[in-house]
Amino acid sequence: MAKAKKVINSSGKRKTAIARATVRAGNGKIRINRVPLELYNHPLAKLKIMEPIALAKKKVNKIDIDVKVEGGGVMGQADAVRTAIAKGLVDYFEDDELKKLFLDYDRSLLVNDPRRKEPKHPLGRGARKKRQKSYR
């Protein structure tokens, strides 16, 4: 019987952005919302997304990564994408050294950031800002 092709699904979250990555055997193509990473608009976000790929080095040449990301802003999406890619790489290669490398570099590569926006409170414009009091 033929061996089934290995496909790994992983996800990453940051604020309200959610990224879902699919890692499969291929020839090094990385696409975010069907756009190749080379054509990704925001340069700072692109650098952030490239971090797990740069750390994994030559291993990435043997796989294709497709990421779908929605919600949040540009940098929130970038953080969600990098987490999804890093988790997918660790699961695909089942490599403890790669996992340790990612954790030593930046823990948020493998762990979703739990921080969320605090809800607005009464008597104010936001979570912390309050209406000014006047005593006279």
Image: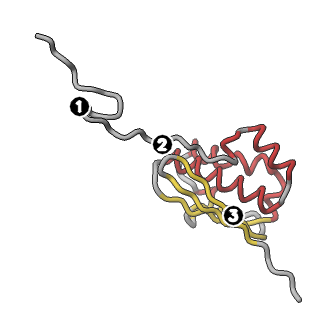
Labels 3 & 1 near each other (Cβ < 8 A): no
Of 26 and 129, nearer the camera is 129
Location of residue 9 in the rendering, given as x and y in whole percent from the top left corner: 67, 66
Q: How far apart are labels 2 and 3 at the CA level? A: 27 Å
Q: How far apart are labels 3 and 1 at the CA level? A: 47 Å
Characterize the local packing of mark 2: few (<14), some (14-19) or many (20 or more) Cα atoms within 10 angstroms: few
Callout 3: SS:
strand
Labels 2 & 3 near each other (Cβ < 8 A): no
Label 3 or label 1, whichever lies nearer to me, is: 1
- Give left or right: position of 132 versus 66: left
Q: Earlier in the sequence, mark 2 or mark 3?
A: 3
The residue under label 1 is which amino acid type? Answer: Leu
Q: Which residue is mark 2?
A: 116
Location of residue 125 in the rendering, given as x and y in whole percent from the top left corner: 27, 33
Q: Residue at x 57, y 58 (%)?
A: 19
The residue under label 2 is which amino acid type? Answer: Arg
Q: Which residue is mark 1?
A: 123
- Give left or right: position of 93 versus 74: right
Quadrant that contains the C terminus: top left
Q: How far apart are labels 2 and 1 at the CA level? A: 21 Å
Q: Which residue is mark 3?
A: 65
Q: Earlier in the sequence, mark 2 or mark 1?
A: 2
Label 2 or label 3, whichever lies nearer to me, is: 2
Q: Residue at x 32, y 38 (%)?
A: 120
Residue 81 higher or lower than 132, as above or below: below
Location of residue 21 in the rendering, given as x and y in whole percent from the top left corner: 64, 62
Location of residue 26 in the rendering, given as x and y in whole percent from the top left corner: 77, 70
Residue at the far bottom in the pictured view: 1
